[in-house]
Image (tube, helix red, strand yellow):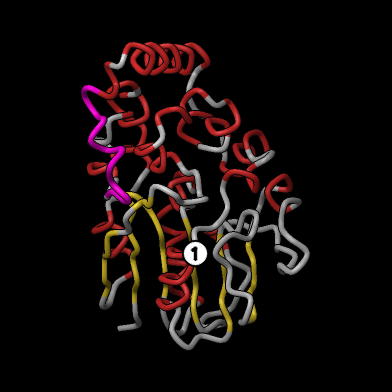
Amino acid sequence: MTSTIRYDAIGAGYATTRREDPRLRERIHAALGDARTVVNVGAGAGSYEPRDRYVIAIEPSDVMAAQRPAWAAPPIRATADALPLRDDAVDAAMAVLTVHHWDEAQRTGVRELRRVARGSVVIVSYDAEVFAEMWLMRYLPEVAALDRRIFPPPATLAAWLGGPVAIEPVLSARDTPDWNLGSFWAHPERVLDPAARAATSGFARMLAAVVDRVVEGVARDLASGAWDERHGHLRALAACDVGMRLIVAHPA
């Protein structure tokens, strides 16, 4: 399944539960530096796009594009591996939680980000090895195995980008409005919420039998108190490192 078809299938309602986190937004915008023109690849519903700069949005999914707010630029239907821009066409490029959906085009797509941007390239992704340690993966090892296949390691992304690259951890806050799968670290009850599950590609890419097994297991352990016996200390944390990474590349 291509990323376009995938998000046409799972993207409905995405803008409701996957709203931008203001803390991550600030870090992304700071990493863009003084760029005035920005291409956002895998732009989705518009989260994390700066409003005070000229943005070129690239989004192949009609379902995702239809959820963009009125203030956001209409997206160009294109894919990351063939950006319809000339070399050094924009000041900066960004790609937020999208590279893992580029399938076999990941390396080419990341090199395209570098090709079209004169300045910074900003990528938000996950370190699958860190994410695999999150409690949910004990119930859902299939996603941990999938993530190891589809998420390029941050060091690999850095190598594809070339030049000086900084890799920084991004803590997942308990109160984040961006309910990506990493946010479930603090909210096991979200596993029981069909809308919350549906807006995460991890759950959406699993067979129904796998999802049913995980929901039943988490519901049982929450009801019995077993989940809190094992993981209740997490309820006292304001934020946790579950593997999200901010990767910022500058021209050589």
Q: Between 85 and 236, which is closer to the camera in this rendering?
A: 236
Residue 148 x/y as whole percent: 30, 38
Image point (51%, 76%), residue name: 116
Is disc 1 surrounded by few (<14), some (14 to 19) or many (20+) residues within 10 Å?
few
Q: Between 166 and 212, which is closer to the camera in this rendering?
A: 212
In which quadrant will I find the C terminus? Answer: bottom left
**Residue for badge 1:** 22
Q: Secondary structure at mark 1?
A: helix
Question: Is residue 3 covered in magenta?
Answer: no
State whether the magenta stretch is mostly helix, strand or loop.
Answer: helix
The type of residue carrying mark 1 is Pro
Image side of residue 164 versus residue 9, left or right: left
User: Residue 223 lies in what quarter of the image?
Assistant: top left
Q: Is residue 141 above or below residue 220?
A: below
Q: Is residue 24 above or below residue 174?
A: below
Image point (46%, 53%), residue name: 97
Residue 143 x/y as whole percent: 37, 29
Residue 8 x/y as whole percent: 68, 39
Residue 243 visible in the current orientation = no
The range drawn in magenta is 229-240
